[in-house]
């Protein structure tokens, strides 16, 4: 992990252990009490404090992970007033003085405490991590981890507990999503359903908005764009924003864009990609024509001998090769399609 980490100590033995632990990690600050006897000079990343209550609220928002070389009970009491939400609380771990017992105490999944504990277990001599998360212990799919690893947004996280409990109890969980996405989920107790059959025990995996309280994972969208020669940046931007608004999507949900290789010198398209930080991909004729999909009719067939631009490009650049929004035309010069 390359996240910013704080190691909290309260006495000389724990500070000594923290300095050893620091050598196994990156981006680390060590906090130590002003009452701690110090041999030699402190480093720039060694920070003194008067009371834990003074520095913990600051550390809570400043660091991705907080490693405490303290008694677990003391840690629980000190962090209790700071707890807000599993989606925003930092990872909190407790490690013993010998650095061979590791307990991920808080934010095991989304915060990365379990991941950091496993990393330390591998690096530290004779170390053992105690992960209490039930889905980890039973090798059960954890939807919040699926979302984190795949870069999906999570909506209605409070509904996760019901879903996880059903899986742990070997009950069926219905998943409303697309077949190509569903086939990447590894659990025998999952059942693919249509978006018309969602109930309270269902998970939704789709970039689109749903007016429900279900656990909803939102994959990133990939756009394929075609345009006439000389189409301006302003026209492309306006068309894309209109396209997204029509489907209640935002530009932040777009991971990347793509087009046909003949468009790689289109200034307007390149400016659009640069403004929004997209690494635009351009696909060749053979790559497009190798696709077996039935695409909407396209003028590109007459001009370039290809099956299309917007739809094929969106599929080729996407993660799951699933076309969700067919080609739409704007101002008789721009075509846009969306895939995941």
Image: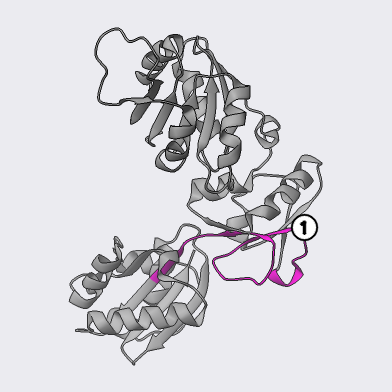
Looking at the image, which is closer to me, 86 or 271? 86
Question: In this picture, is 183 found above or below 296?
Answer: above
Quadrant hosting residue 284: bottom left
Looking at the image, which is closer to me, 88 or 155? 88
Q: Badge 1 is on which residue?
A: 201
Looking at the image, which is closer to me, 286 or 34? 34
Question: In this picture, is 287 found above or below 295?
Answer: above
Question: In this picture, is 301 found above or below 111?
Answer: below
Looking at the image, which is closer to me, 77 or 265? 77
Magenta segment range?
Answer: 195-223
Q: Is residue 295 visible?
A: no
The quadrant of the picture occupied by the N terminus is: top left
Query: From the viewer's perspective, is 89 left or right of 63?
Result: right
Q: What colour-coding does the image apply?
A: one colour
On the image, the x and y values in percent for residue 95 come to 52, 19
Specify whether residue 205 is painted magenta: yes
Name the residue at 31% across, 79% down.
Answer: 237
Quadrant hosting residue 105: top right
Q: Is residue 12 visible?
A: yes
């Amino acid at each position: 992990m390359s996240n910013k980490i704080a190691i909290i100590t309260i006495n000389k033995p724990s500070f000594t252990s923290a300095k050893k632990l620091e050598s196994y990690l990156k981006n680390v600050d060590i906090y130590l009490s002003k009452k701690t006897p110090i041999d030699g000079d402190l480093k720039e990343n060694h920070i003194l404090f008067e009371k834990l209550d003074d520095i913990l609220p600051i550390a809570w928002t400043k660091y991705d992970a907080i490693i405490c070389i303290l008694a677990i009970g003391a840690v629980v009491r000190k962090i209790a007033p700071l707890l807000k939400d599993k989606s925003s609380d930092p990872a909190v771990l407790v490690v013993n003085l010998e650095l061979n017992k590791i307990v991920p105490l808080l934010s095991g999944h989304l915060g990365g405490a379990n991941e950091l504990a496993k990393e330390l277990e591998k690096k530290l001599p004779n170390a053992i991590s105690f992960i209490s998360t039930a889905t980890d212990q039973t090798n059960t799919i954890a939807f919040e981890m699926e979302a984190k690893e795949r870069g999906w947004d999570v909506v209605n996280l409070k509904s996760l507990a019901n879903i996880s409990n059903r899986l742990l109890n070997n009950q069926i969980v219905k998943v409303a999503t697309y077949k190509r996405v569903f086939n990447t989920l590894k659990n025998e107790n999952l059942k693919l359903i249509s978006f018309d059959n969602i109930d309270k025990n269902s998970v939704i995996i789709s970039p689109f908005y749903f007016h429900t309280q279900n656990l909803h994972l939102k994959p990133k969208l990939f756009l394929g764009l075609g345009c006439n020669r000389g189409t301006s940046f302003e026209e492309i931007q306006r068309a894309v924003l209109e396209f997204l608004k029509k489907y209640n999507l935002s530009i932040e949900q777009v991971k990347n864009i793509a087009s046909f290789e003949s468009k790689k010198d289109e200034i307007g398209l390149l400016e659009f990609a640069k403004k929004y930080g997209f690494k635009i991909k351009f696909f060749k004729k053979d790559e497009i024509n190798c696709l077996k999909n039935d695409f909407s009719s396209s003028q590109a067939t007459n001009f370039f001998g290809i099956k299309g631009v917007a739809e094929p490009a969106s599929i080729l650049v996407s993660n799951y090769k699933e076309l969700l929004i067919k080609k739409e035309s704007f101002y008789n010069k721009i075509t846009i399609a969306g895939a995941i």
